[in-house]
């Protein structure tokens, strides 16, 4: 990164572009791999793991917030350690630990999901964060978003 000052416009654009990946990954993982397991865990109780427009909208906001945290953490990390692939791995992993590992372990610990679901959700969510950080890495490296 050539500019160490935080550029809000650059941050917003990179967050919005990166959120396309994050949203797609979240939707795929949930609908293809998680939803049926959650419904099965609760023995198909009505209203569990359902998706409607309101919930889907909240989920989109959640994914955008998650992306903003990832992009900001990546930017912050690169201010000291440069814009490298190592920064992608570390920043992506930090956000993954702080968001997904805590969420899924707490969910399973409270009896709201099966522990086995972590074997699916944790590796895929880690990959999601790494790819998201890599997208931010590539966009910040181009430097086209500075103005």
Image (tube, grey):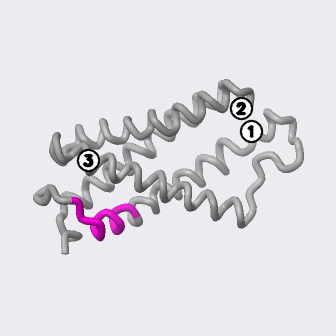
Instruction: Give the residue pinned by disc 1.
Output: 38
* Mark closer to the observer (1, 3): 3
Q: In the rendered image, which quarter is residue 61 located in?
A: bottom right
Instruction: Measure the alpha-carbon separation of dots 3 and 2.
Output: 34 Å
**Nearer-N-terminus badge (1/3):** 1
Q: Main secondary structure of the magenta part?
A: helix
Position of residue 66 in the picture relative to residue 77 (left or right) = right
Position of residue 143 in the picture relative to residue 106 (left or right) = left
Identify the image quadrant of the C terminus.
Answer: bottom left
Residue 46 position in % (x across, y down): 89, 48
Residue range corresponding to the magenta coloring: 6-15
Label placed on residue 76: 3
Label placed on residue 113: 2
Position of residue 53 in the picture relative to residue 63 (left or right) = right
**Nearer-N-terminus badge (3/2):** 3
Secondary structure, mark 1, is helix
């Amino acid at each position: 990164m050539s500019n160490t000052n935080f550029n809000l416009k650059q941050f917003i654009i990179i967050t919005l572009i990166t959120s396309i990946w994050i949203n797609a990954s979240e939707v795929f993982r949930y609908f293809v791999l998680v939803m049926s397991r959650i419904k099965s865990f609760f023995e198909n109780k009505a209203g569990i793991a359902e998706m409607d427009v309101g919930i889907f909208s909240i989920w989109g906001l959640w994914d955008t917030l998650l992306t903003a945290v990832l992009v900001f953490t990546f930017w912050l990390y690169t201010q000291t350690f440069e814009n490298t692939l190592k920064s992608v791995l570390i920043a992506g992993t930090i956000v993954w630990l702080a968001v997904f590992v805590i969420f899924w372990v707490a969910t399973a610990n409270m009896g709201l999901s099966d522990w086995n679901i972590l074997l699916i959700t944790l590796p895929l969510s880690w990959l999601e964060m790494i790819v998201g950080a890599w997208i931010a890495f590539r966009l910040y490296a181009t430097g086209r978003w500075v103005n």
